[in-house]
Amino acid sequence: MFGLSPKEDKFYLLFSQSTEIIAKTLKRLQGIMQQDSVSAEDAAQMHRFEHEADKVTTQILERLNSTFITPLDREDIYKLAQVLDDIVDFAEGTVERMLLYRTGKPSLGAQELVHLVELATEQIQAAFACLGNIHFKKSTILSAAEEIYNLESAGDKLYRQEVARLFEFEKDPIEIIKWKEILEHIETTLDHCESIADLLKSVVLKYD
């Protein structure tokens, strides 16, 4: 991808901004998962991150509509922008549920599940950093996608273990309902990371 025009290069800069927002969102979520409770300020901060992510997504889509020649297929740029934005939405949704349900400190398993999401988003960030040089960075992107698949597989196993633990040791049915939904939401976030890996892989193969 030599000689990119400023307009073309701007797409990669915006993708970088989007993945940076994702990184700080997941880092904050990991911190929240280690607290004894969730505060209104925690939720407000996540909402601010979500608003930041929306603004970047809007910029990408506006530039897509105003740029004649794009560095990747238009459909791929559109999909990539949307799926990145969704990760922050999922993270915000997790904190909203914890605040709404007035949950206590999450279990170590729930914390580890979020940690797996955080690791997956690190791989996403690394892969997106290579898109501007996709012809020479294919193997790096594909390696990141493979690692995301491994993390998602580990997350599936951990999710099942945590749900089983809930039903075995938690005596309060309300607590079971609360945490089962939250765990499902976190696991869905990890599934979404796998979908991003699929999309990245398909983009790379177009340039094979």
Image (cartoon, grey):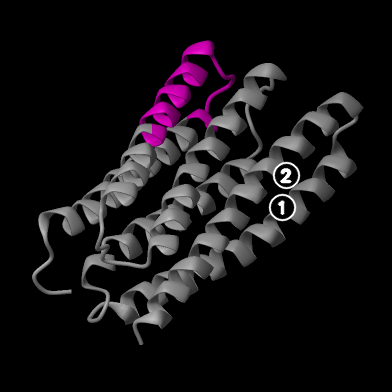
Q: Residue 164 colored magenta? A: no
By secondary structure, the bulk of the magenta-drawn segment is best described as: helix
What residue sits right under mark 1 in the picture?
A: 159
Question: Is 3 or 123 nearer to us in this picture?
Answer: 3
Residue at disc 2, secondary structure: helix
What residue sits right under mark 2 in the picture?
A: 184
- At x 58%, y 27%, the residue is 95
Q: Is 96 left, or right, of 7 in this rendering?
A: right
Residue located farthest toward the top when viewing the structure as drawn: 40
Residue 172 makes an appearance in the image: no
Residue 185 found in image quarter: top right
Q: Mark 1 near mark 2, Cβ–Cβ under 8 Å?
A: yes
Q: Is 141 left, or right, of 161 in this rendering?
A: left
Q: Residue 49 colored magenta? A: yes
Residue 205 makes an appearance in the image: yes
Crowding at dot 2, Cα within 10 Å, few <14 / some 14-19 / many 20+, comes out as: some
In the image, residue 6 sits, relative to residue 167, either above or below, namely below
Q: Give the range drawn in magenta.
A: 32-54
Residue 80 found in image quarter: bottom left
Distance, label 1 to label 2, CA atoms, is 8 Å
Residue at disc 1, secondary structure: helix
**Residue 205 point in image, percent of width and height:** 42, 82
Residue located farthest toward the left when viewing the structure as drawn: 3
In the image, residue 84 sits, relative to residue 105, either above or below, namely below
What mark, if any, has residue 204 been given in the picture?
none
- At x 88%, y 42%, the residue is 167
Q: Which amino acid does label 1 sit on?
A: Tyr
Q: From the image, state whether disc 1 or disc 2 is nearer to you.
A: 2
- At x 60%, y 31%, the residue is 93
Q: Is 31 left, or right, of 179 in this rendering?
A: left
Residue located farthest toward the bottom when viewing the structure as drawn: 208
